[in-house]
Image: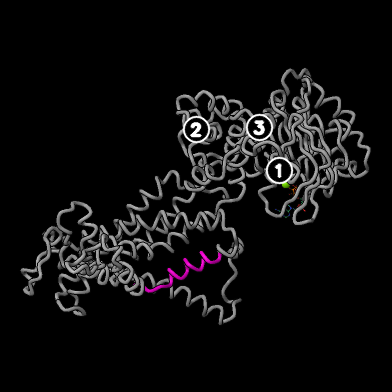
Amino acid sequence: MAAAAPKRTGAVESYSTWRWTDRLALALCWACGIALCVAAASILLYMGFRGLQYLRPELLFERPTGAVDQTKSGGILDPILGTLMLTVLGTAIAIPLAVCVAIWLVEYGRPAGLARAVESGVEIVAGTPSIVLAIFGLIIFQQPWLGWLSFTAEGGGVFGRSLINASIMMSFIALPLVVGATREGLNAIPGHVREASYALGKTKAATIRRVLLPAVRPSIATGTALGMGRIAGDTAIVIILLGNTLLIEPQEGMPVLGLLTGTGSTLTSYVYENSPAGEGGAYEKAYAAAFVLLLVVLVLNFAVARVVGGSSTSRSNLWNR
Amino acid sequence: MESLMPPPVRRIAADRQATVAPAPSSNGGEPALDGAPARARGLSRPDRPRVPAIERMRAENLVLAYGGKPAVKGVSLPIRQGEVLALIGPSGCGKTTLLRSLNRLTELTPTATREGRILLDGQDVDQLEVTQLRRRISMVFQQPNPFPMSVFDNVAYALREQGKKRPGKKELAPQVEEALVRAGLFDEVRADLQHPALRLSGGQQQRLCIARALAARPEVLLLDEPCSALDPKSTEVIEELIVRLREEVAIVIVTHNLQQAYRVADNVAFMYLGDLVEYGPTDQIFHAPTQHRTREYVGGAFG
Ligand SMILES: Nc1ncnc2c1ncn2[C@@H]1O[C@H](COP(=O)(O)OP(=O)(O)OP(=O)(O)O)[C@@H](O)[C@H]1O
Ligand SMILES: [Mg+2]
């Protein structure tokens, strides 16, 4: 008679040895993780369902009009372009500033008092609600000497609202995220990698430019993707600083500068205005625009990963494997 | 056990083959040389051709401290081209600190202080511009640390001089290739010079780091436990390289592997708690040490 094969014990101890509180905590961890997945999936699925239901291709290419009759109120071309321009400009301003701040903090960071002050500065910017940034920006950009950044009325009053002004304030939203990710990336580079460069007779500048920056590109990309999402999703700065005009309205007579100093709107403000919360009550358009906003953010994230993060081949900065 | 043993290094012009075999070890699992000191002396070392020794560097009364706590206490040493110098000693005795002070890397540690003189060809290193100095004295670290760029660019990076107009890839290619050949890596990476260096294996990465260090034709090469992360095969390649290079470059190697020190070094310095306990020709240190601390330390390895 063959003896039953002895039962092999598991690699992990059996839960029956756990206290009931530990078991409950573990169950909660599982539940929370799964709940988050469900929440994310329902947002995506519901918005996708609604978006596809109301989104017609021509909406993407038609300019909006102010008509109350929804069959005549046009498409969402201007808000789409507004979101794209604002996000790209905002991050384009934020990335160099943030990378400089992070490099100074990690690679120099002396005197220590100044470094602490810079760190607090970044934290304060990170913690400031965007509506506060917007109001502050408006006060600044309405100063007469900054009048060239926006539209100046006949009497000399500065309007203070323009694409470039909104982008500058938007960059403050992305800045702390890029600073944080870049700092983390720099801190993760072992000291001997820097020393290896110095040991070849390289200056600190060459080391930062040729060794550290390429190594933190993926980190910069991560921070940028987060920052872009925040910029594309912000409404307060759009309403207060971009002018929230339904159409993109460049200033007359200047080809590119006119666009930068002109006003416009974005998908977020469009959704807000057309949702039941705003005045339009055109929820079909709101759903379509919200869905497009989601897609735009996804596309921008993908683009950032490719452009800033570099090809996937350079993304193996694993000195500590 | 056998797979743990670094295979014997075959010397150029060796008439007898070195026999190194696993033996019951008396030193915490470290494989030991077969046989008594007398036999080992006759077998493994003296066969390699002597090359003329020229003194390139000298440390005089070197005292190094971190935040006032001394790590190296009054060490004087010559470093010669043509003779490999091995630094041995228990963990924490100051080998790395001593090595890093030679190309003034310790000065990057804010708490580190130094007393005493270091001479390179009779000139005090403190008087040399530091980037110039480090081009002449390059260093390979314990952990492989290729830069996040292609294999080619890693070596080319070392070649491009500061401030000068950057030479193009075409002009650098022969020098890059030569450095890779010297480090024994070229055959393996010939086809993918443009691949990211961090995709190489650990042993290949370390040889790339050696190629990089050799590319700018340094006069002194500092190696800090270069083989500690490597397999026996890569270790053998690097040891052969060290022995071959000693003619053109003055080499200092820190190692915890006494067999390795025995195989590659002409002179050995034994350090203990920051003191240079004994310095002398390899045979003397391993077979006839004058200090009992040295005898205790190397005794385990050679029975
Ligand atoms: N950056 C540092 N700051 C403070 N003390 C340090 C620093 N680096 C090394 N030390 C101290 O200096 C002494 C010598 O260290 P070192 O790294 O030179 O030893 P080592 O001989 O290379 O040891 P190992 O064989 O383990 O690498 C040790 O006591 C260590 O604690
Ligand atoms: Mg060490």
Residue A1 appears in the rendering: no
Above or below B178: residue A237: below
- Residue in the picture at 55% in, 66% down: A116
Same subunit, labels 2 and 1: the answer reads yes
Q: Nearer the viewer, mark 2 or mark 1?
A: 1
Q: Which residue is mark 3?
A: B136
Mark 1: C-beta under 8 Å from nearest atom of ligand 1: yes
Q: How many marks?
A: 3
Please name whichever residue, B271 or B193, is drawn nearer the observer in this view of the structure: B271
Residue B184 in the image: above or below residue A147: above
Which kind of residue does numbered mark 3 sit on? Answer: Arg
- Residue on which the image places disc 2: B152
Question: Marks 3/1: CA distance?
Answer: 14 Å
Q: Chain of mark 3?
A: B
Which residue in the rendered view is the most extreme toward the front? A155
Residue under the point 26% across and 60% down: A148
Tag 2 secondary structure: helix
Q: Tell me which segment is drawn in magenta.
A: A116-130
Q: Position of residue A34 (x, y in %)?
A: 40, 72
